[in-house]
Amino acid sequence: MIKKIKLLPVILFVFVLITSCGSDDDGGGTAAVVPVPALEPNTAPTAVGTLTYPSSDLLCIDSTIEFTWSAATDVDGDAISYRLTIALERNQTTIVEQLTTTATSRTVTLQNGTAYYWNVVAFDSEDEATASQTFAFYTEGDGVSNHAPFAASLNAPALEALLNAGTTSLDWSGSDVDTSDTLTYDLYFGVTTDPALEQSDISASTFDVTTVAATTYYWRVDTKDDNGVKSIGQEWSFSTN
């Protein structure tokens, strides 16, 4: 009986100590939860602001060309790399060179007497990427007195834009290294891919079309010079509400 009486205060002390450690200041018995700060989303680098050389619509006498461009920036401080793409069409379907570098220049040897289209994509370590605009240039060919015009570039409506039905103004730009050439355009327009000819020998670089609601339209502009040399354009599309 004496031993039991002496052990009782020890047992009570241990019980109080355990229950005190397992409860919060409010006595609710729930441990505090420390919030985990949310991770900041990664931001893509800015686009290359200037394609320095070859400049837009340039006639290059030498087919070995040093492509140069301005540096992009990244607000996250990530290292930036660049992907230089050179193709035979403005939408870069047929790629002839595609090179990756951390520098802002690369030298490439191309074929003579050919129209090329180039741009630069800046990307960071998370593969977030931003593309520059696309420039056209021409490499001089031996004994060439006339050059094919460049493929038309899109102004409006924006690619895959959603517009109100009604009258839509199609707007594009044409160019040619032979600056004395007068350019005309063949417009293809319709509700299916590879649309039919809408109007030929257009002298302006705009054309109004009538659209109906809830429809996707496809269009293309082919560019012709004084000598009848034609460049086939890229197919574009837009939809109506």
Image (cartoon, rainbow, N blue to C red):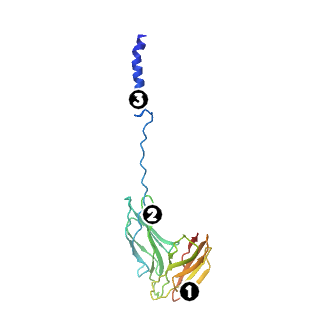
x and y percentages locating residue 43 in the rendered image: 42, 60
Q: Quadrant of residue 81?
A: bottom left
Q: Is residue 151 visible?
A: no
Between tags 2 and 1, which lies in front? Answer: 1
Residue placed under numbered mark 1 in the picture: 201
Residue placed under numbered mark 2 in the picture: 129
x and y percentages locating residue 153 in the rendered image: 49, 77
Question: Are the residues at dot 3 and dot 1 in contact (C-beta closer than 8 Å)?
Answer: no
Which disc, if any, is residue 20? Answer: 3
Q: Secondary structure at mark 3?
A: helix
What's the distance in space between the residues labelled 3 and 2, CA to CA?
56 Å
Between tags 3 and 2, which lies in front? Answer: 3
Q: Secondary structure at mark 1?
A: strand
x and y percentages locating residue 115 in the rendered image: 48, 79
Residue 26 is left or right of residue 234, and the answer is left
Q: Secondary structure at mark 2?
A: strand
